[in-house]
Every structure is written in C-alpha cells, then in structure tokens.
Amino acid sequence: MHLLLFDDPAIRPHLLPLTFTRPVAALRCGILTIAEKWERRLAPASVGYLTQPYLQAKFPAGNVAGAALVVNGAVCPDDLLARQVLALRPGQGLYCGETLVAAHLADASKVAELIQDGLEVRQSPEDVSVIERPWHLFLRNGAEIRQDFALLTAGRTSQPVGDAHTIVYGAENIFIEEGVKIRAAILNAEDGPIYLGKNSQVHEGAIIKGPLALCEGSHVNAGAKLRGDNTIGPFSKVGGEVGNSILLGYSNKGHDGYLGNSVIGEWCNLGADTNTSNLKNNYAPVKVWSHAAKRFVDTGQTFCGLLMGDHAKAGINTMFNTGTVVGVGANIFGAGFPRTFIPSFSWGGAAGFETFKLNKFAEVAERVMSRRGLAYDAVEQGVIAEVFKQTEEDRVWEKTKVV
C-alpha cells in the first residue's frame, strides 16, 4: 500500500525555517527521519509526500491513485502507534485529540476532501509524539535515538570496535555498522545507546557519551566532546563540544567551540571557534523568532541554542546568543553578537546586513554540494528561488533602501 506523509497546515509554519526546504516528515529526530521511522514500521509499497507545491518536485507524492495510508508527517511513531495505523479500515481516521494522526483512504486522489470531511473518527488510546516546534526536535532526540536504535538493531550483530586503544563502556548498547573506523576514542554507552552508521569515523581522542547517532559517512573529529542526546546526520563533520543537538545532514561544525540544544540544517558550516549560548544569564525561559507568528515567542525552555536553516554559514569566532534563529542561505561573520533573528539570505553580522543575492548564493551552493558529489540542479534552484521570494519581507533593510 502507498504511504503518503502530509504536512499538517497547523504545524508546518511553526517549524520554519527548517521546513522552508523540506516536508515536515523529512526532519531528522533520533537516528532516522520521521518518514524513515514510518517506512520501516509500515513497510509500504511506496512512499510519497503531500507538501508545498514548490517542494513537490524534490519530494514527490508519487502515484496517489488507489488505496493509501495518509500519515501526519509531524508524528513520530512507535510500534504501538504503527499497529493502530495498520488496523485502520478504509474511511477511518486515527486522531489524538483534534490532531489527525493517520487515515486509511480507499481513493487517495480525493485526499483533501476526505481528510477535511468524511472520515470515521477513531481516537488513539495513548498520547502521540508530535514535533510541533523546532525545539521539540532536540528535546525528544534522546528518546528517539533509543527507539530508532532498537528498531534498527533488532536481531542484528554489531561489527566489533576493532581498535585496541579505544575505551568502551556499556558495550551492549553500542552498534557499529560496516565500514566504521574508530581510533583511540572513548565510547560511553552506559546512559544511552551509541549508533555508528555505515562508513562513519571516530577520530583520535574523541569522547562520546550516549545517546548518540552518528549517521552514514559522518566524522567525529579528533578531540571532540559529544555530551549526549546528539544526532550527527549523514555526511557531516563535528568537532569541539556538542550537547543535545542535531545536525540534519551534509553540515560541518568541524572545530572547537560549543553547540548546545540546537538544530542545524543541511549544507551548513560553523567556522572555527563558533559558539552558541543556550542559557540566559538570568535563567529565564528562552524566546525565539517565529516565522508563523511574526514575533518572538516563549519556548518555555530554560535551554535553547541555535536554530539554523539550510545552506547557512557562520565565519570563525561567530558568537550566537541564546535562542538565535538563522534563516536559509544566511552568511554571518564579524565581531560581536549578531541579532537573534537573522533572516534568510542575510549577509553580514552585528554591524548590519545586506542581501545575499541569488547569483552569489548559487556560486557557493554549487561549490559546497559538488564536494559531496551532488549537483545544485534545477530542482534545488527552484526551491531556493521560492524561499528567497517568500522571505523578502523579513529582510527589512530592503524596504528602507534608497532607490
């Protein structure tokens, strides 16, 4: 059966800037993306996304004719919830309160009409885990690593550590995929599992505390200190000190500096000695910019660091204040603390910003993506052009520019 993961319109705007460039279900929390969690549990014939029109070329819906399970892309499943969804009969919808979790549609081509009206309502007997705000990703990351670890490793045998100079604690909670290389590191999985993905590397002197997800092809650089509840997405590099943070993939924080309680998009780079504050001096709850509300909103969290959209870059010694939100394609540099909301396609820092023009952005994106063997092709360009258009009003300096 076809699986369709939809962007809940009541949730997706609140997950910007991360969802400017991907469907909600393509967000990573734990080892896997939300879509991958559902796909592994439901084992559908095919998977598609019901997302924004400008994202559909990159994340297609596929063939929507015929029967399908339609699932809320913001919901993180467990085994019980997956069984409840598989038990749905055609025309039934599973809800948690007023939130639609999933529906079984006999004809998915009529998905909009059926979701809005006409479903037989069934309530989930248990609360479900819904990613409704960006900080929910790091708040739930440790629990999701544990669940994904159990899902991915059940009935399988880990590769050996294979290095006489690496110190291991809680070896039963460590799983190593093929091609992993470890040299003179400390792996402590006593408080949570450590998952080392295919062809990943842990370099000399790295100290890793679980829960940790190191995804395919990623590196923990020499001397790094990973303090727990961290996800390093595919083909990324991380160094320095990191706690309770997620790099979605293809991003680098390769040098010293602190990253805590943060979510970093794809194709980002944090220059040497970049630091994030994750705690206010007065210990007050952190407020962050909301693209949906067009104002700063209270997270209710004492700890919240950096929320960074795709393709953003920070120069060496950049200092991010508590609860900073950085949009897509921003380039930050210079002395001092930049503002706590940096709009998409900003160029500058504490001294002020100008617009990072699309042609200049494209030059950087082509170079960066080619280093991973990927092309900044017409599909990527189309997504970025639409995000540039949608975020024009955030770049307030453009409105005051003398013509």
Image: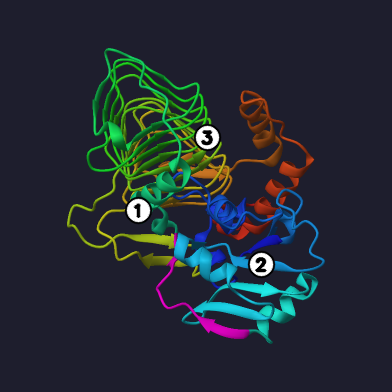
Residue 241 seen in this snapshot: yes
Foreground label between 2 and 3: 2
Q: Residue lying furthest top in this view?
A: 164
Q: Nearer the viewer, residue 316 or 167?
A: 167
Question: Which amino acid lies under the numbered mark 2 shown in the image of this protein?
Answer: Leu
Q: CA distance from mark 1 to mark 3?
A: 20 Å
Question: Which amino acid lies under the numbered mark 3 shown in the image of this protein?
Answer: Pro
Residue 153 figure quarter: top left
Q: CA distance from mark 2 to mark 3?
A: 28 Å
Span highlighted in magenta in the image: 120-133
Foreground label between 2 and 1: 2
To which residue does mark 1 refer?
143
Relative horizontal placement of residue 159, taking residue 283 as reference (left or right): right
**For the residue labelled by badge 3, is the local secondary structure a helix, a strand or a loop?**
loop
Q: Tell me the quarter of the image containing the N terminus.
A: bottom right
**Mark number, residue 69:** 2
To which residue does mark 3 refer?
234
Residue in the image at 46% along x and 60% along y: 79
**For the residue labelled by badge 2, is the local secondary structure a helix, a strand or a loop?**
strand
State if disc 3 and disc 2 touch (CB < 8 Å). no
Residue 130 seen in this snapshot: no
